[in-house]
Amino acid sequence: MLFRRRRRRHELQPIGEADAYAHSYGERSDDVTNVKAVEPEPVEEEAPRLTDRAIRNAFLSRLNKR
């Protein structure tokens, strides 16, 4: 049985608060973007769920109509 050697992770140097903020949020710009609301797509109604009893009753009623 072969065992794989795990690679050692390199420790990262701690960063300051200003660097963490710049990394997280980046630079702020004065550009303004207008966002439009999107209308939700219409939802299709689901067909009613049929039970085995309902299918059997429908079948029997069609047979009786003959």
Image (cartoon, helix red, strand yellow):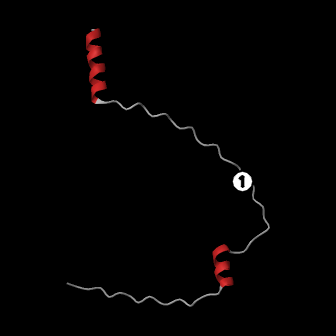
Residue drawn at (41%, 90%), measured in percent from left and top? Answer: 8
Q: Which of 33/18 is in front?
A: 18
Question: Could you tell whether 49 is left or right of 44 in the image?
Answer: left
Spot occupied by residue 37 in the image (x, y as percentages of width and height): 68, 48
Q: Residue pushed farthest right?
A: 30
Residue holding disc 1: 35
Image coordinates for residue 57, horizontal then vertical, percent: 28, 20
The quadrant in which the N terminus is found is bottom left
Residue at 27% x, 29% y is 52
Front residue of 27/61: it is 61
Q: How many marks?
A: 1
Q: Residue at x 34, y 30 (%)?
A: 50
Q: Is residue 37 above or below residue 10?
A: above
Horizontal side, residue 42 vs residue 25: left or right = left
Instruction: Give above or below for 23 relative to 51.
Output: below
Q: Residue at x 53, y 89 (%)?
A: 12
- Residue lying furthest top: 66
Give how far across and how far down residue 6 sits, in percent.
35, 87
Give the quarter of the figure containing the C terminus.
Answer: top left
Seen in the image, is 11 located left or right of residue 56? right
* Residue 54 drawn at (x, y percent): 31, 25
Amino acid carrying label 1: it is Val
Q: Where, by quadrant of the figure, is residue 23 drawn?
A: bottom right
Secondary structure of the residue carrying numbered label 1 = loop
Q: Is residue 5 left or right of residue 15?
A: left
